[in-house]
Amino acid sequence: MSTLVNAASRDALAATELQLLQATDGASPAEITGLADELFNVAALLSGESTLRRALADTSTAPGSRQDLARELLAERLGARALPVVVEAVGSRWSNPGDLVRGLERLARTALLVQAERAGRLDAVEDELFRLGRIIGAQPELERLLSDPTADSDGKAAVADQLIDGKVESVTQSLVRQLVSRSHGQHVSEGLEELAELSARRRERSVAHVRSAMALTDAQQERLAATLQRIYSRPITIHLEVDPELGGGLVIRIGDEVIDGSTAGRLQALRSNLGH
């Protein structure tokens, strides 16, 4: 599982995660699984189609034009929840086309972790990912087979299924299948450890640091806390800071995730997309 190291790509991922959270709000487990599968399939499509990948990540083209192209080409492939996420991702500024692909993969995995979190199974998923990483890492032949980027993806997924089918959470199995089918040459044991760390970070999120252009009423704060609680499946405490320089909207930080819905944030993103 590759990490996004460029600041522009991390910002693009954070912006797109806001759309992902909106897409998962109120969704059933089956709908979230479908959303994750569709995002991962788009990542696989772009990985194999270099011309399309470059076109959708070309920062010299206006974001709206890239988004229109994504809608035109992908609308029939994607459901109502996945399409807005992909459109948002395409309209963001990634440091390179490969980061767009890796960002979509990360979003697919995040969606699955959201599903586990809402079902109260995130602890179990984290533990299973960690233990699987140790098991595979201790078997060099299995590690090489599952990590080989030239091996058949379906074949590697079948091997993984033989190892874990019926023994782990469904979310864990989906995450493992995704990882072995597109490991990017990384050792699968390392990717599993990173996924375990990602799930652990989600469990730590319980305080929302909110910056708002204007003061929120008690009722507004209660509605915001209720919305975030639905998203993260745990009680959320709101820490509010009024910042008129935002120009409007909210900036929400929960753990290391930033949800920027402010006017200033959107203007900054627009300036970044324009290269200014």
Image: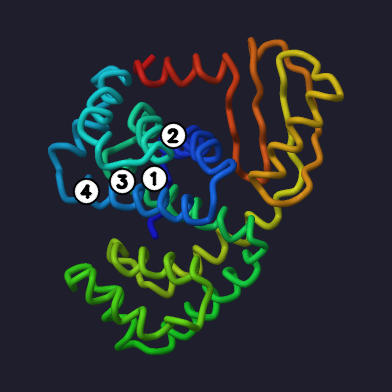
Task: Indicate the amino acid at tag 2.
Answer: Ala
Of the two numbered discs 4 and 2 on the same chain, state the one appearing first in sequence. 2
Disc 2 target residue: 12
Q: Kindly indicate whether the residue at mark 1 contacts the one at mark 3 (C-beta within 8 angstroms).
A: yes
Foreground mark, 4 or 1, reads 4
Looking at the rendering, which quadrant does residue 185 occupy? bottom left
The reply to whether discs 1 and 2 touch (Cβ–Cβ < 8 Å) is: yes
Query: Nearer the observer, disc 4 or disc 2?
Result: 4
Q: CA distance from mark 3 to mark 1?
A: 5 Å
Residue, disc 3: 101
Residue at coordinates 62% horizontally, 44% vertically from top-left?
Answer: 256
Name the quadrant of the N terminus: bottom left
Q: Which mark is residue 45?
A: 4
Q: Earlier in the sequence, mark 4 or mark 3?
A: 4
- Name the residue that disc number 1 marks: 103
Mark 2 or mark 3: whose residue is earlier in sequence = 2
Q: Where is residue 173 drawn, in percent x and y?
A: 44, 71
State the colouring used for the structure image: rainbow
* Badge nearest the viewer, 4 or 3: 4
Q: Residue furthest right?
A: 218
Label 1 to label 2, Cα distance in Å? 8 Å
The quarter of the rendered structure image containing the C terminus is: top left
